[in-house]
Amino acid sequence: MTAATLTPTFAPAGSAAVELDGVVKSYGSHRALDGIRLAVRPGEFVALLGPSGCGKTTALRALAGLESIDEGRIEIDGRDVQDLPTNRRDIGMVFQSYSLFPHLTALENVEFGLRMRKVARAERRARALESLALVGLDERGGRFAHELSGGQQQRVALARALVTRPRVLLLDEPLSALDAKVRVSLREQIRRIQTELGITTLFVTHDQEEALAVADRVAVMNAGRIEQIGTPEELYRTPATAFVADFVGLSSGLPGELHGDTVELYGTRLPVLPGETVPDGAVRVAVRPEDVRFTDAADGIPATVVSSSFLGSLRRTVVRLDDGVLLSVQHDVGQAFTAGDGIRFVFAGSPVRVGEDTSRGIRRA
Amino acid sequence: MSRRRPASELAPRGLTRGLILGLVGLLWAVPIVGMIEFTLRGGLEGGHTFDRWVLVFTGGLDASYKPLWTALGNSLVLAAVTVVIVLVLLVPTMVLVHLRFPRLRRPLEFLCLLPITIPAIVIVVGLAPVYSVVARIFGSGTWTLAFAYGILVLPFAYRSIQANLDAVDVKTLTEAARSLGASWGTVLIRVLLPNLRRGLLAAAVIAVAVVLGEFTIASLLNRNNLQTALVVLNKDDPFIAVVFALLALLFAFVLLVLIGRFGAPTRRRTE
C-alpha cells in the first residue's frame, strides 16, 4: 500500500480547539506516532479510529500529557501545552478501564475535580449533582463503584470528566469493556451530551461502527500516521487509501487490472476514485457489498453461494467466484439463498479504491 | 444438580478441619498456658497467686523495675520511628517504581527481601561501623536503632504493600486523578493512600511486632529495648519478666485483630 500523502482537513488557522502538529513519539525503534497532524474545531466531535497498535491511544495520551513526545507541537485553545503537566491542561478524560476512585461515592468522585479547583462546598455539591443528572445517575450519588454496573461506572466517569467544564474531553475507548447493548446506548448518550454542552471531544476507538455513528469527523490511523480525516460519509464513499477502504466499512478485495482512471474487474470496467497513486497493472480492488447486484442476465459473472446471513433489514451473502475469490454482496431480504446455489452478479458501477496487489489470492472477502 | 468446586472439595471438612485446628491451637497454646501458669506460681510455698499481675497493674513494682519501663518506652518509640521510616521512604518509592519505573520492580523486590536471608548477627557486623557514623550525626539515642529496624522490617512491609499495589489499578487511578487536576502529592494522599490502607496497616503492624520482639541487634549494639530489658530482668525476677513477655504478646495480638477489623476495604453503604 502506498504511504498516504494527504493533507488533513485543517480548520482555519487559529480557530482550532486542539491541534497536534508533527507529533512524533518513539518507543525504542518503534515509532508509535509518526508526525501526526490533527486539528479539531471548537465543539467538534472527532474520533481517532484504527487497529490496535496504530498509535491512536498514544496520540490521546500525548494530548493529555500522560506521554511525553519526542517532536512536534500540541496546542489546546491556541496555547502550547507541551510544558504543562496533565493536571494543568484543563482536560476531562474517561478511560477504558474503570477508573472511579473505589474509596469515594459516585457523588464524591464527581466532586473530586471541583475540589482540586477549590470550588466552595455548596457549589461543588450542586454542580456534581447536576453533572450526575446529565448522565441520569443523580439518584445513585451515594453508591460506591462496586455497587454500580460497568455502564453506570463509565457514566459516572463521564460526569466526573465533564463537571469541571474542561476545554477538551478525551475518551479513551470508554465503551470497550461494556456489553453490546449498553455500548450502543452509552455512545448515543455521549453524543447527546457532547452536542448539548458543545464540548470539543476526541474519542479513541477501534470500532468503526462506533466511530462512524457518533463522530462529526473521523481520523483513520495506521502505523502511527493519520491516513485520512473526514466525515463518516467521506471516509465510506471516497476512502483516500486502500487501507481506509479496507478498514472503514465492509469491502471485499478482488484482483483487478488498473488502466489510468479505470480498473478492469472480471470483464467490467469501473471508475477509480480520484487521487490514486498506484501504478497501472495488477491491483487489489476494494468492492463494497452494496455495490454488487445479483442478476439473471447471461452475461453476469458466475459464482457459488458460500453463506447467507439475515441482518434484519437486509441480507448479506458471501459468494465464491470461479477463481476461488470470496465476495460479499448486500441485498434485499426478499432474495434468499442457500449454500451451494449458483448465482450471477454484476458490479453496480460505483467508483472504487484500489491498492497495490501485494496479496492477490491471499486476502479474500 | 451439584456444581463442581474443586478448590472447596480439596479443603478438609468437618472433623478433619476441627482436628487440624485443635492440634495447631494446642501447639500454640501449650507455651502460652505454660507461661501464664508460671507467672501464677506461689514460689517455694507452692500454690497459685495473682499477686504479680496485681503488682504490675497497680504500679506496685519498686524502683528496681524502672529500667523495664524505660525499655518499654524505648521499644514503643522505636516501633513508631520504624513505621514512619517505612511509610515515608518505602511507600513513595514503591509507588514511584510501580508507576514510572516498572523495570526496577524486580531489583527493588530483591533488595527489600534481602534482609530476611541475612542472619541478624551478620547484619550487626555490617551495621557496627555504620552506627559509629550514625552516632556521630544523630547521637547514640536508642531511637537510632530504628534505622536498622527499618531495614529489618523491609521484607514484611514490602510484601504487604506490594500485594495491595497489585490489587489496585494504581496507574489508571493516578492518571484519572491527574486529569482531574490533582498534583502528585494530592494523588498520593487523597487517592493512593486510602486505597492502599490495608497494605499500609499490615506493614505498620508487622513492623511494630518485629520491633517489639527484636533482641539480637539491640543487644549487640548495646541499646536498651524491651527484649534486652526482659533478659536482664529474667535473671532477677523471671516471674515479672514472663508477665511482660505475655503482655507484649497480647499487644501484638490486639494489633493483629485491629488490622483485621479496620484494614478491611471500605464497605460504607449510605443508602
Image: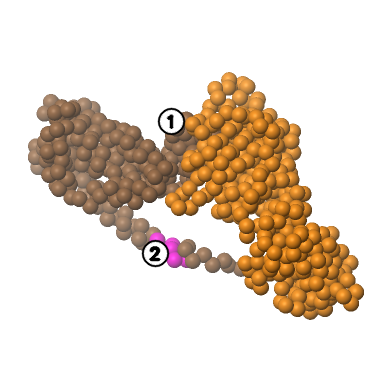
Render colour scheme: by chain
Q: Position of residue A192 (x, y in %)?
A: 74, 38
Given the current orientation, which residue lies at the most extreme right position? A297
Colour chosen for chain A: orange
Q: Nearer the viewer, residue A62 or B73?
A: A62
Bounds of the magenta span?
B9-17
Q: Establish whether labels 2 and 1 are both on one chain.
A: yes
Q: Which residue is mark 1?
A: B185
Q: Which chain does the numbered disc 2 sit on?
A: B
Query: What residue lies at 15% left-to-right and 37% top-to-bottom?
Result: B130
Q: A122 left or right of A311?
A: left
Tell me the element at label 1: helix
Q: Which residue is mark 2?
A: B16
Picture layout, residue B68 above or below residue A202: above
Colour chosen for chain B: brown
Q: Nearer the viewer, residue A324 or B18?
A: A324
For disc 1, the neighbor class at 10 Å (few under 14, some 14 to 19, many from 20) is: few
Q: Could you tell me how many numbered marks the image carries? A: 2
Q: Position of residue B185 (x, y in %)?
A: 43, 30
